[in-house]
Image (spheres, rainbow, N blue to C red):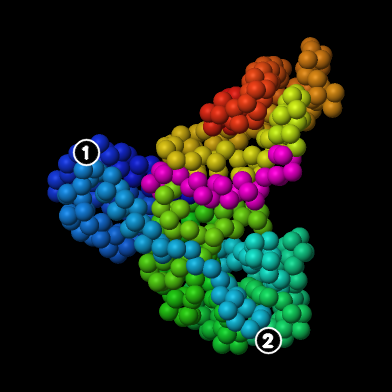
């Protein structure tokens, strides 16, 4: 997400950094570039106008003109205004109510409401230790109820059965009654969407809101809709007392205009964003981290959180202990590291959060890196247990079998073995005197050990 705007702003900001003195012309030229970048990212025109005006007023003020590093100060201003535009801080859900907290999701059809219901239930379960029940009031879309039931079973959360011959209001009342009896912490309600906004749809969602009196009413919007997302948000905001927004499909949105516009036009915070198809792919929306990512400064905090949550600490500790004892780093160990990287979203996810990497490089390296990781994993998986632990025995006929089994070429197997030999030598050098810390310093931040495998 934000690749296009990040690349454009990155070039503009780079030009500013070296300036020891800024004039009104410098600032005007910079803001013209920023304005173009925002419009190309499909940010709503009123949002762009106000954002540029705020930056202009601050950039022409004493704060910049008297600074010894005016270019850096302007960058700081742009960053702060981006954060302000998107809502300053992450705003959580409201559980300050008598259980169950009722969370109503509204939006157009095709925005990912049903999967978001389940993602939200999983988030509450795993991150906040909250017990949820989910229910579908969508009696119009074929298989909507079955889809929710299947997804709920996958993550082991309670599902309230509904039927297409029951009215949405009747379903909502019954679900709320059952949620109270079951003593759940949250009832998450999936409402019906339409391909377009109409009076019938708005009347129905207003009826549901009146019956449920939810603690949170969240507008679910597809970030790839661009300007249409802003228009839909305005209509729903007029019809319902929204408490927040969930952006979906942000992994497929290179522009990011919706994220920069929806909060402004609704006045409601973006609470979460969907980052993929998996039920675990829902993360809190942190405006400061997103602004940092847009300006090419990375998002190290989110990266650290992902490492904490998505890596197997027990396996990592076992490998560290093994290396400290002087035991060899094997191809089995290497395969585990590749799998951990893929669990974190692959090279693309890593590069997106690391500072100082151009957007163009991220796109190329991410695609190439993820593809190569899959190939390496396939080659190692085609080996026998003995071959993984003692790769020295892999000669001509074995190489031919491994290549055929992994759908690769013998040259690919040779390249992997050569790289792995270099990695083993490096591991041995750095895990002797000075221990694992010396090894990590020697890596110089490269992943996997010894550099990228391509």
In the displayed structure image, the side of residue 200 where residue 322 appears, left or right? right
Image quarter where the C terminus lies is top right
Q: Which mark is residue 218?
A: none
Q: What residue is drawn where x is 72% and y is 83%?
A: 180
Q: What residue is drawn where x is 71% and y is 44%?
A: 312
Element under disc 2: helix
Towards the viewer: 19 or 140: 19
Marks 2/1: CA distance? 63 Å
Please state the extent of the stretch shown in magenta in the rendering.
Answer: 294-317
Can residue 412 be seen by looking at this rendering? no
Element under disc 1: loop
According to the picture, the residue beneath numbered tag 1 turns out to be: 19
Local crowd size for mark 2, using a 10 Å CA cut-off: few (<14), some (14–19), many (≥20): some
In the displayed structure image, the side of residue 199 where residue 73 appears, left or right? left
> Where residue 396 sits: x, y (%)?
79, 11
Residue 314 among magenta residues: yes
Residue 394 among magenta residues: no
For residue 156, which quarter of the picture? bottom right
For residue 391, which quarter of the picture? top right
Task: Look at the picture and state if 401 lies above or below 297.
Answer: above
According to the picture, the residue beneath numbered tag 2 turns out to be: 173
Task: Look at the picture and state if 157 lies above or below 419.
Answer: below
């Amino acid at each position: 997400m934000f690749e296009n705007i990040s690349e454009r702003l990155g070039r503009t900001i780079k030009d500013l950094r070296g300036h020891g003195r800024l004039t009104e012309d410098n600032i005007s030229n910079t803001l013209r570039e920023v304005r173009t970048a925002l419009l190309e990212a499909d940010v709503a025109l009123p949002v762009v106008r106000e954002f540029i005006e705020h930056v202009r007023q601050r950039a022409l003020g004493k704060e910049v003109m008297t600074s010894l590093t005016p270019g850096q100060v302007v960058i700081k201003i742009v960053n702060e205004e981006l954060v302000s535009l998107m809502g300053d801080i992450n705003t959580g859900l409201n559980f300050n109510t008598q259980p169950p907290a009722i969370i109503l999701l509204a939006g157009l059809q095709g925005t990912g409401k049903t999967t978001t219901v389940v993602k939200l239930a999983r988030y509450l379960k795993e991150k906040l230790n909250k017990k949820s029940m989910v229910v579908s009031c969508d009696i119009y879309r074929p298989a909507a109820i079955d889809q929710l039931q299947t997804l709920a079973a996958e993550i082991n959360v309670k599902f309230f059965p509904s039927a297409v011959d029951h009215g949405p209001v009747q379903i909502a009342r019954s679900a709320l009654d059952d949620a109270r009896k079951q003593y759940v912490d949250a009832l998450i309600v999936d409402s019906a969407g339409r391909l377009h906004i109409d009076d019938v749809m708005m009347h129905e969602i207003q009826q549901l809101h009146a019956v449920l009196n939810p603690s949170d009413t969240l507008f679910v919007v597809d970030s790839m809709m661009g300007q249409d997302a802003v228009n839909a948000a305005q209509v729903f905001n007029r019809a319902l007392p929204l408490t927040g927004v969930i952006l979906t499909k942000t992994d497929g949105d290179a522009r990011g205009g919706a994220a920069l516009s929806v909060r402004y036009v609704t006045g409601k915070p973006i609470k979460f964003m969907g980052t993929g198809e998996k039920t675990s792919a829902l993360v809190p929306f942190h405006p400061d981290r997103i602004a940092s990512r847009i300006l090419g400064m990375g998002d190290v905090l989110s990266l650290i959180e992902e490492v904490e949550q998505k890596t197997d600490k027990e396996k990592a500790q076992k490998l560290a202990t093994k290396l400290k004892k002087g035991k060899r780093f094997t191809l089995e160990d290497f395969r585990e590291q590749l799998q951990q990287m893929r669990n974190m979203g692959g090279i693309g996810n890593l590069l997106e959060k690391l500072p100082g990497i151009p957007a163009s490089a991220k796109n190329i390296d991410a695609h190439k890196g993820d593809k190569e990781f899959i190939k390496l994993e396939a080659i190692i998986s085609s080996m026998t247990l003995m071959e993984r632990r003692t790769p020295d025995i892999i000669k001509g006929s074995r190489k031919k079998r491994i290549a055929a089994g992994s759908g690769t070429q013998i040259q690919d197997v040779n390249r992997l073995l050569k790289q792995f030999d270099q990695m083993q030598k490096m591991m041995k050098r750095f895990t002797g005197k000075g221990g694992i810390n010396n090894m990590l310093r020697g890596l110089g931040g490269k992943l996997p050990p010894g550099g990228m495998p391509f």
